[in-house]
Amino acid sequence: MKNSILITSMIWLLAMTQIQAQNGPTGVLNSTTTNTFNYVKEGVKMPYFVTVQESRNYKNIFDIADMGKVDKDRINTTFKVSKLITVTNNANPRDNSVIALRYDKRVADTFKLVSTDRGFAISVDNRTVEYIMGKGIQFANTADRDFFMIDEFDSME
């Protein structure tokens, strides 16, 4: 009787391990970066801070041809990226704002914040959106509007 319970327990444990192993591995990335930029207002450089909080949720998918192999090739898939961009200007609190930026990202994509004379530009995989201090979001190319999902809010002090 003890042997049958032990064998049944081992089979059940092995089955649960296999079921858990078949679920694709997932990942979550959370990061925060802060940048200090300057914009020119009436000939004077005005400093401001840009804080980017990033959150990614992604799932790894393996090539079907590699099923049963020890070394598997991972298929590059898109995953959702959400960035909360907070603009803080101590000299002029009316310029404080929060931008929620969402897009689909591939593994090789790049995200850059570039300082400009009027604010900063956000560049993702050669798609650009510009934030102009005091005015808000501007798109240089209207085709980029379909790539980004943007919500902009004024920050309340």
Image (tube, rainbow, N blue to C red):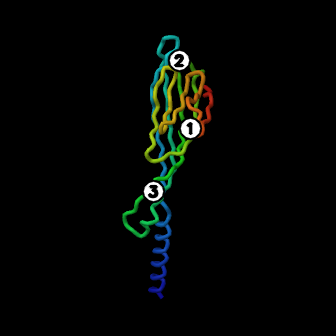
Q: Position of residue 60 (x, y in %)?
A: 47, 56
On the image, numbered disc 1 is attached to which residue? 101
Q: Is residue 66 above or below residue 128?
A: below
On the image, numbered disc 2 is attached to which residue? 91
N-term mark: 2 or 3: 3
Residue extending furthest toward the bottom:
1
Numbered disc in front, either 2 or 3: 3
Q: Is residue 66 above or below residue 113?
A: below
Measure the C-alpha gap from mark 2 to mark 3: 48 Å
On the image, numbered disc 3 is attached to which residue? 75
Q: Secondary structure at mark 1?
A: strand
Q: Is residue 75 left or right of residue 84?
A: left
Residue, x 59% and y 33% (percent of image)?
142
N-term mark: 1 or 3: 3
Q: Is residue 11 above or below residue 28?
A: below
Instruction: Look at the image and tell me whether residue 112 can be seen.
Output: yes
Residue 62: quadrant of the picture: bottom left
Residue contact at pointers 1 and 2, CB within 8 angstroms: no
What kind of residue is marked 3? Ile
What kind of residue is marked 1? Leu
